[in-house]
Image (spheres, rainbow, N blue to C red):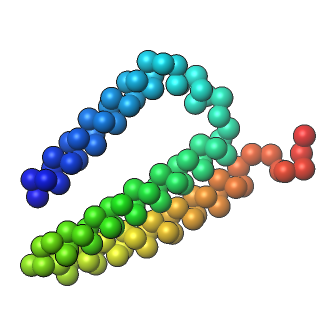
Amino acid sequence: MIIVAILVRIIVLLGVILLFVFGLFGGWRMLRRTTMKTRARIGAALSFAFFLLAGLWLLVLAALYPSDGAILVVIGLYLLGQAFYAGTRLWLAAEKCGPPQGAQ
């Protein structure tokens, strides 16, 4: 469990560094120019990726620690299902954003 805590701290630190560098080099202006559809697609992909990684991580932990395996497998499988559900739903919602394809 110490390894998990260290990995979480590293990910948070990398996220803070990324936000600082992104803001430093004018990335926020680029974000303002993107369309809502693009932002929604990015959100759908990130949602899918995070749920998928969390589910896979719990399944790996279940294999490594068989004493807590049953509950980790259940939660891991739930998160895998949630990845495919939430990612797909958000992607379909993103496709409805913006003007129709034939509009000018």
Residue 10 vertical position relative to residue 24 in the rendered view, above or below: below
Residue 2 vertical position relative to residue 12 in the rendered view, above or below: below
Q: Position of residue 5 (x, y in %)?
A: 15, 50
Q: Is residue 35 left or right of residue 7?
A: right
Q: Residue at x 34, y 36 (%)?
A: 15
- Picture mark count: 0
Q: Position of residue 16 (x, y in %)?
A: 32, 31
Q: Quadrant of residue 17?
A: top left
Q: Position of residue 14 (x, y in %)?
A: 30, 36
Q: Residue at x 68, y 38 (%)?
A: 35
Residue 47 vertical position relative to residue 8 in the rendered view, above or below: below
Q: Is residue 66 left or right of residue 71?
A: left
Q: Residue at x 24, y 70 (%)?
A: 60
Q: Is residue 25 left or right of residue 70?
A: right
**Quarter of the image with the C terminus in it:** top right
Q: Residue at x 15, y 72 (%)?
A: 64
Residue 10 vertical position relative to residue 101 in the rendered view, above or below: above
Q: Position of residue 44 (x, y in %)?
A: 54, 54
Seen as rendered, the residue at the extreme bottom is 70
**Quarter of the image with the N terminus in it:** bottom left
